[in-house]
Amino acid sequence: MRAFLVAATLAFSGLAYPQSDIALSYTGSKFPTFKLKTLDGKTISSQKLKGKVYIADFWATWCGPCRRTIPILIEIKKKYKGKAFEVVGMDLSERMPKEGIQKFVSAMGMNYPVALQAESVARQIYAARLPTLYVVDKKGVVRFGESGMMYDPDGSKLSKLVGQLIAER
């Protein structure tokens, strides 16, 4: 119990990230190639995102921690508007009708594309816990991954990383 409390204190203080997180193990790997339909009927693909930094956020409507991550991503999207940056919501709400997903997206105020039926991509990158997010650089390489509750509660570290990656040549 004591070891858990120490680890939790370090993680939530921002002094450490959980190194056992499977999402972190993909750092340095290419993000899987994908092509998915979005909630608005368009197509989003890894090819269309080439040359942009993006966050791929795997979530579901029923996921409580996902509801805490989404507002952070909305703010990061606003901060880097007009830059070579995108947030892509990767919906994993199996069996949820499209109308239910649309209602959730509207209620959350999501200002970024939402890819539907992203299970195939989730399996390739092992996004088994929700939420799982990956920060992908302009070359399609995963530069950061995290699953479960964010250890950066205000998103400042995530936002800083995005800014650094946008600035890279």
Image: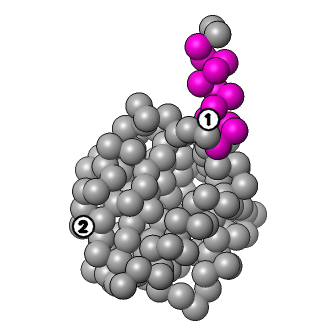
Specify the amino acid type for callout 2: Thr
Question: Which residue is at a point 24% across and 67% down the rendered structure image?
Answer: 33
Residue 103 vertical position relative to residue 122 in the rendered view, above or below: below
Question: Which residue is at a point 67% across and 79% down the rendered structure image?
Answer: 79
Q: Is residue 73 visible?
A: yes
Tell me which label, 1 or 2, sits earlier in the chain: 1
Crowding near the residue tagged with mark 2, few <14, some 14–19, many ≥20 C-alpha atoms within 10 Å: few
Q: Secondary structure at mark 1?
A: helix
Residue at which label 2 appears: 33
Residue 12 vertical position relative to residue 29 in the rendered view, above or below: above
Q: Secondary structure at mark 2?
A: loop
- Does the CB distance between marks 1 and 2 fall below 8 Å? no
* Residue 52, image quadrant: bottom left
Question: Which residue is at a point 39% across and 45% down the rendered structure image?
Answer: 24
In the current view of this chain or complex, which residue is farthest to the top? 1
Question: Which residue is at a point 58% across and 60% down the rendered structure image?
Answer: 158
* Residue 99, image quadrant: bottom right
Residue at which label 1 appears: 11
From which residue to which does the magenta span run?
Answer: 3-14
In which quadrant is the N terminus drawn? top right
Q: Is residue 30 left or right of residue 164?
A: left
Closer to the observer: label 1 or label 2?
Answer: 1
